Amino acid sequence: MTKIITIGSATMDVFVECDEANIVSVCSKSKNSDFMSYPYGSKIDITTFSSNVGGGGINTACNFANLGFETSAIFKIGEDIYSEGILASFKNKNINLNNIIQKKETSTGFSIILVSFQGDRTVLAHRGANAEIKEEEINFEAIKEADFMYVAPLNGESNKVLEPIVKYASKHGTKICFNAGTTSLKRGYEHLKTMLGSAHIVVMNKEEAIMATGIDVRPDTKTEKFSHELIHEDIKKMLTKLKVKDYQIIVITDGNKGAYAYDGHKFYYCPVFPSNVVSTLGAGDAFASTFCAALGKTRLNIGLSLMYASVNSSCVVSEFGATEGLATFEEIEEKLKNNPDYTYLEG
């Protein structure tokens, strides 16, 4: 069985939805911005409330385990009520927790997710221990023993461990899927290029790809024909720039517009799989980790792997909670079987 280890954040997430929340759009000459608003100075009843575990390290570990892989996770938590909730959530999940880092002197990550009636969300995040991972706290031997390492965003001081763990994994033959965090992206393309060069799979959303490459998607730039759909030439430029090694597969997700991939030979496009959107939290983690897992399942069929990823992501957004709704390979395949018109494009 393939051994997978993930490294990233761990949080206790509290989801709050309120019928009195408004979406306010503000326009200027240069941009349009949307804000979630509540009546100022008021006490407002919560319509829907729930709590669950989250964070890139946990979300992806739960998904890999659910898909049938031997999974281990590296993340850091404190010794508090939130850490108790996180550890309790793993009782019925087949995930090795021997490599987690727990320190009494720090606080566990915590997020409040404000969910809009449109299904999107605003996250108020306290990173806590997630921003305090130190190199000496990591069990490098576990990385060496893994076949595959998924690197979720590491922000704050934790970003400093990124380069040594990636180098170590690469040296010992552990394949890497890299999902860059904001801290890495802000350090610029030349710094990021070192990380990219060690990764077999790189996944970013469009906003992250713009930050990483410095290439914006200009509304006045013409698109070129891509089978019977359209792919923006600026997205092709981003995919091409992010691919720095021949063996890499680059993926850029674009919300409800779908996802793109590039392997150096072909460009791929996959639309979103239709679903009822309740909360988009965790959708990106589900997509990226499912894509990585599906490449082995489909024998490196990139287009089909994008479809698997889109289906599983649609399952997650249909539920509250970043790890709720995750589908198995069998469930994903059943959904694809029941939707024969759903497909990808390549060219």
Image (spheres, rainbow, N blue to C red):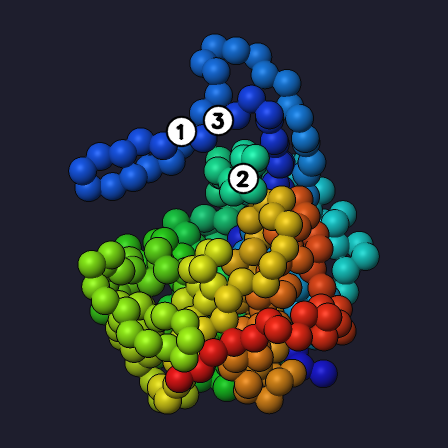
Q: Quadrant of the N terminus?
A: bottom right
Q: Is residue 153 visible?
A: no
> CB atoms at circles 1 and 3 under 8 Å apart?
yes
Q: Earlier in the sequence, mark 3 or mark 2?
A: 3
Q: Nearer the viewer, residue 144 or 248?
A: 248
Q: Is residue 223 visible?
A: yes
Q: Quadrant of residue 213?
A: bottom left
Q: Is residue 142 above or below residue 12?
A: below
* Label 1 packing within 10 angstroms: few (<14), some (14-19), many (20+): few
Write the residue at 29% across / 39% down.
Answer: 32
Q: Secondary structure at mark 1?
A: strand
Q: Amino acid at mark 3?
A: Asn
Write the residue at 63% across / 55% down.
Answer: 275
Write the residue at 54% across / 39% down.
Answer: 118
Residue, far right: 92
Where residue 51 sits: x, y (%)?
A: 68, 38
The residue labelled by disc 3 is: 22
Q: Secondary structure at mark 3?
A: strand
Q: Is residue 102 left or right of residue 26?
A: right
Using the image, tell me which numbered label, if any, was put on residue 24.
1
Where residue 264 sits: x, y (%)?
A: 36, 86
Q: Quadrant of residue 262?
A: bottom left
The residue labelled by disc 2 is: 118
Q: Nearer the viewer, residue 314 or 285?
A: 314
Q: CA distance from mark 1 to mark 2?
A: 12 Å
Where residue 317 sits: x, y (%)?
A: 61, 51
Using the image, tell me which numbered label, if any, was put on residue 182.
none
Residue, far front: 228
Q: CA distance from mark 1 to mark 3?
A: 6 Å
Write the residue at 60% across / 26% down.
Answer: 18
